[in-house]
Amino acid sequence: MFFVKKAAAIILGSILLSVGINLFLVPFKLLDGGVIGLGLIINYLTGIQAGLAIICLSVPIFVLAWVYNRAYFYNSLHGMLLSSFMIDFLSRLHYSIIVSFPIPPILSSILGGILIGLGIGIMLRQRTSTGGTDLLAQFLSTKYKINVGIFIFIFDALIICLGGLLISFQAFYLSAITILVVGIFTSICTWNMENDIQLING
């Protein structure tokens, strides 16, 4: 039953994440944080598929996880692969839908953040994720004894600043809104998660 719930969370989370990215971020060249944000920057600048870029960027991080944290490797690999596949698979749909249902960029950044946050949160509730810079944040947190959230914030801030420099100022400030909304809805999904796990384990 545990594996069925985990598989369902990965599938549903990956779909929500991919829909949020393709339907609401990509049409306005907006960014998410972490490796997904870097993959989107590569896609906007070169045309390389974002999912493929995410997989390539994730290779050194997963090698690091294999060496230092096998549990993280196994818990995140499926989420990263499926979400990357779904991002590329659904990429053919976003332009036709946005043309049919045009919405303002700021609303798009909020709606995209909601879907991405829900997708990530659903996966985190089943102890899985899409991997990415969170692992680097964990290593740095352990080494320097600083809260992991601070390092995640720094990574995300650097990525959207890079996007602002390489893409546009609109990409910078709207992506900041997206990341904020992602954080809020991820937190909502994972609220009391540790308490739920303790109840399950007795």
Image (cartoon, rainbow, N blue to C red):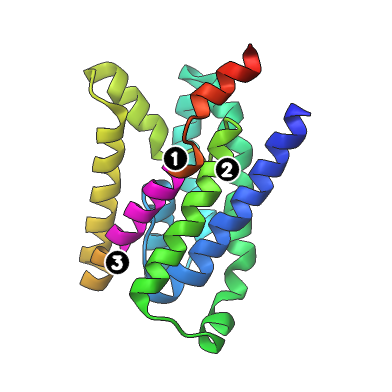
**Cα gap from disc 3 to disc 2, whole angstroms:** 24 Å
- Type of the residue with mark 3: Leu
Tell me if label 1 and label 3 are in contact, CB under 8 Å: no
Q: Position of residue 61 (x, y in %)?
A: 44, 34
Residue 174: image tag = 3
Indicate whether residue 176 is drawn in magenta: yes
- Residue underneath mark 1: 132
The mark nearer the N terminus, 2 or 1, is 2
Query: Can you tell which quarter of the image residue 110 is in?
Result: bottom left
Q: Which residues are magenta?
A: 174-187
Give 54 or 115, whichever is nearer the viewer.
115
Taking the spot 36% from the left edge, 50% from the top edge, the residue there is 33
Give 43 or 96, whichever is nearer the viewer.
96
- Residue underneath mark 2: 122
- Type of the residue with mark 2: Ile
Give 114 or 195, whichever is nearer the viewer.
195
Q: Would you say 78 lies left or right of 142 here?
A: right
- Callout 3: helix, strand or loop? helix
Taking the spot 23% from the left edge, 23% from the top edge, the residue there is 146
Q: Report the mark closest to the observer, 3 or 2.
A: 2
Q: Main SS type for the magenta part?
A: helix
- Type of the residue with mark 1: Gly
In the image, residue 86 above or below residue 111: above
